[in-house]
Amino acid sequence: MSEFINNSKIREAQLKQLIRDIHKGLPLEEAKIKFKHDFGSITTEEIVALEQSLIADGMAVTEVMRLCDVHAAVFDGSIEDIHKKKELTDIPGHPAKIFKDENNRLEKLIKEELEPYLDKTDNMSQLMLRVGIERLMQITNHYARKEYLFFPGLEKKGINSIPQVMWGVDDEIREMIKSLHTRLGASEANLMEISQSIKVTLTKVKDMIVKENNILLPKLVETLSFYDWIQADKGSADIGYFLEKPQETWAKEDADSNIKPVQPKAVFDEVKFDAGALNPVELNSLLNTLPFDMTFVDKDGNVKYFTQGKERIFSRPLTIIGRHVSMCHPPKSVHIVEAIVESFRSGKKDHEDFWINMGPMFVYIRYFAVRDKNANYLGTLEVTQNIKPIRELEGEKRLVSE
């Protein structure tokens, strides 16, 4: 081990140079040999710091995302602390164990339900591949829990590279799987071409499994507090799981008995408005009864509030409270969100509207600048509603339904 580079500053500089060399075209096998010779192994902490440093140096997040796949190939098997602090992944029902178990389930699905039917052109293989891809599409739940329940805990500690890079790659995987599902459903699908695309997609999925198990999970175990895990546990069911709902529960009543939800003030402590007043219970219930979702981002860009109605369009776990709005969206759409907020802050605009088809829904998404009576910018309000039933209205309705 004496020939390995051990000085921390020199190691970081040399590791960054190796990544830059790969970026410039250094063949992967040569990179692996050089890494083994010069470094021998690497810690999770070094990988996180390396990505943070590359972004700080000006490398685009999208480029770090691309190199992320290279990291998995070069560093896999060389991460020296992957066996430390794994106790949480052994606790039945714990979010960390559920996440690790889902990765095992992912690997099993790939091996048993997809790979045996690749490079075949018969109708049965096409059917089996389509079924397998449909099941693989539930990976969106796995990734969403990671993005909305795990990443906030890292961001609170200033660890932004993992969320930024992984979320971008997650989005790429989701789009690739969605495209495969559409292509396999076509009447004249070219199975040989689709098989090649499936192989590329599965490689990306398997690389992400390596990164989640060897980089993300150890970092989560090291960083997240007991309260962070409680929040993640409570928000998991709303988002969903990959293929199977966990049989065990972790956050039992006695586990979080010392963590009490914030209770509203006494009912006589009313909030006064320009027209009337409501006590906290009335106000909270009224807002949650509205037939649309509302989310408020304060003037500093932090999520401060969202309604919790019965029919939710997008998942809004409690972990996003206090999270910066730029970290609540995939990297590819962050610039749009930031542009909207900046146009409101500058006074250039007061609102922006979007509408999208989302499964059986036609979703109307509206953004409004919130200002006080002196036109000072206070934040941004997002209002989201499924307006398909409204668009389908015809004639008149003047009588009460029975």
Image (cartoon, rainbow, N blue to C red):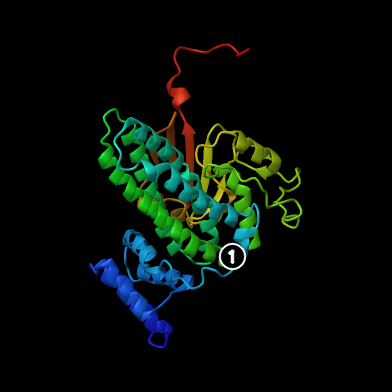
Identify the image quadrant of the N terminus.
bottom left
Any part of residue 375 in sight: no
Viewer-nearest residue: 299 or 290: 290
* Residue at (47, 59) in percent of width and height: 212
* Residue at (39, 72) in percent of width and height: 53
Reply above or below: 17 against 306: below
In the drawing, does residue 293 fall left or right of residue 176?
right
In the drawing, does residue 348 fall left or right of residue 157?
left
Where does the image place residue 111, in percent across and percent down from the top left? 43, 48
Q: Secondary structure at mark 1?
A: loop
> Which residue, given by chain and number where applicable, does mark 1 sit on?
86
Viewer-nearest residue: 281 or 120: 120
Residue 88 falls in which quadrant of the image?
A: bottom right
Residue type (three-letter) at the residue carrying disc 1: Lys
In the drawing, does residue 87 fall left or right of residue 360?
right
Where does the image place residue 187, in percent across and percent down from the top left? 29, 27
Where does the image place residue 180, in percent across and percent down from the top left? 34, 40
